[in-house]
Amino acid sequence: MSYVRCQRCGERASMRLHQHRLNFCKEHYFEWVLKQTDSTIQKYDMFGKKTRVLIAVSGGKDSLALWDVLWRLGYQADGFFIDLGIDAGIGYSAHSKHFAADFAAARNLSLQVIDLRAQYGEGIPELARRTQRGKGRPCSLCGMVKRHLMNETAVAGGYEVVATGHNLDDEAAVLFANVLGWNQEQLQRQSPTLPRRGGMPAKVKPFFRLYERETAAYALLQGIPYVYEECPFAEGSTSLSHKVILNQMEDQSPGTKMRFVMNYLKAKQSGFFLQETHAEIVAELHPCPKCGQATASPNFCVFCRTMEH
Ligand code: Q46
Ligand code: ZN
């Protein structure tokens, strides 16, 4: 019987990468993912072997796969999980925390957990009901809370860099939305690496050149248990519908998402978009009088204003 073979060893292939025209068995697929990630980290100067990296872990496939890869590559990455207090009848946050904690325990890695409700008296659903920003869909509020707590934890723990598990599909969907809305500011800023800013840690996305199906396959083949359910609030989001459209284009022409993101980065580098200088970005910011985080809003930062009631 004929079957597709791994191009390294000739064994039966477990993974076919259409856009790269590569086929691998399990072991050589792992090797390829590790190599790809390491080359992204180095090419984009994300961090070194001695840098203390804080990784934002959600309990999903991307962040756990990233943590696993960084751990295998010998980077110093500690985990950070926020219990957002989202239940929605499926125990979403509790379930996610369980996967993150089990992953860390199995590898003897350190995971910090922040429980939003225990610490601030409200989880995302209550915050969304109470505040204007959360009306209808809590994602913008949730994103703001996550960014704030991530910065706070990184600064308190002396981490220079925060890494997230965003993959190529995520980056392409954000870029797609930014292009559709001609969101100039975001088109200038979207990047797999954001430098340290106003005392805040750098933000990096070491998986941004891997397709979602590649990170999912890594987690699955590596036997990493992760939360399968999407956050219930993600349902019906524009970002999910943009992903469906991008997937249709990718099916018709493999490599579309990769070209979209990589050519955007090239265009940006060659001066296609006006670049803000680092000095200009920092000049707009001032420290929040309450928490000290850099903010562009007058007086207190959005997080402190949201939490104060
Ligand atoms: S956790 Fe939060 Fe996401 Fe849920 S409420 Fe929206 S932003 S969808 S990644
Ligand atoms: Zn503040």
Image (cartoon, helix red, strand yellow):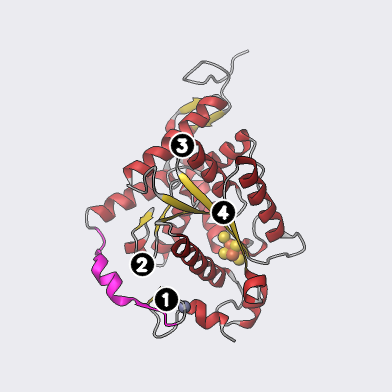
Marked residue nearer the N-terminal end (2 or 3): 3
Marked residue nearer the N-terminal end (1 or 2): 2
- Badge 1 is on which residue? 292
Residue 24 picture location, percent across and down:
52, 25
Q: Label 4: state its secondary structure.
A: loop
- Name, please, the residue furthest toward the top: 1
Lateral position of residue 250 relative to residue 278, left or right = right
Lateral position of residue 109 relative to residue 201, left or right = right
Answer with the quadrant where ligand 1 appears in the image: bottom right
Marked residue nearer the N-terminal end (1 or 3): 3
Q: Is residue 246 above or below residue 35?
A: below
Dot 2 crowding, Cα within 10 Å, few <14, some 14–19, many 20+? some
Which residue is depicted at the point 47% across and 20% down? 7
Give how far apart the Cα atoms at labels 3 and 4 are: 18 Å
In the picture, the disc for residue 199 is 2
Q: Label 2: state its secondary structure.
A: loop
Region in magenta: 272-289
**Quadrant location of the C terminus in the rendered image:** bottom right
- Badge 3 is on which residue? 73
Q: Label 3: state its secondary structure.
A: helix
Task: Please identify, in this view, whether the residue under mark 2 or under mark 4 is nearer the observer.
Answer: 2
Lateral position of residue 16 relative to residue 42, left or right = right
Residue type at the position of mark 1: Gly
Q: Label 1: state its secondary structure.
A: loop
Residue type at the position of mark 3: Leu
Which residue is depicted at the point 39% across and 65% down? 200
Give how far apart the Cα atoms at labels 1 and 4 are: 24 Å
Marked residue nearer the N-terminal end (3 or 4): 4
Dot 3 crowding, Cα within 10 Å, few <14, some 14–19, many 20+? some
Q: CB at mark 1 closer than 8 A to ligand 2?
A: yes
Front residue of this view, candidates 157 and 234:
157
Give how far apart the Cα atoms at labels 2 and 4 are: 22 Å
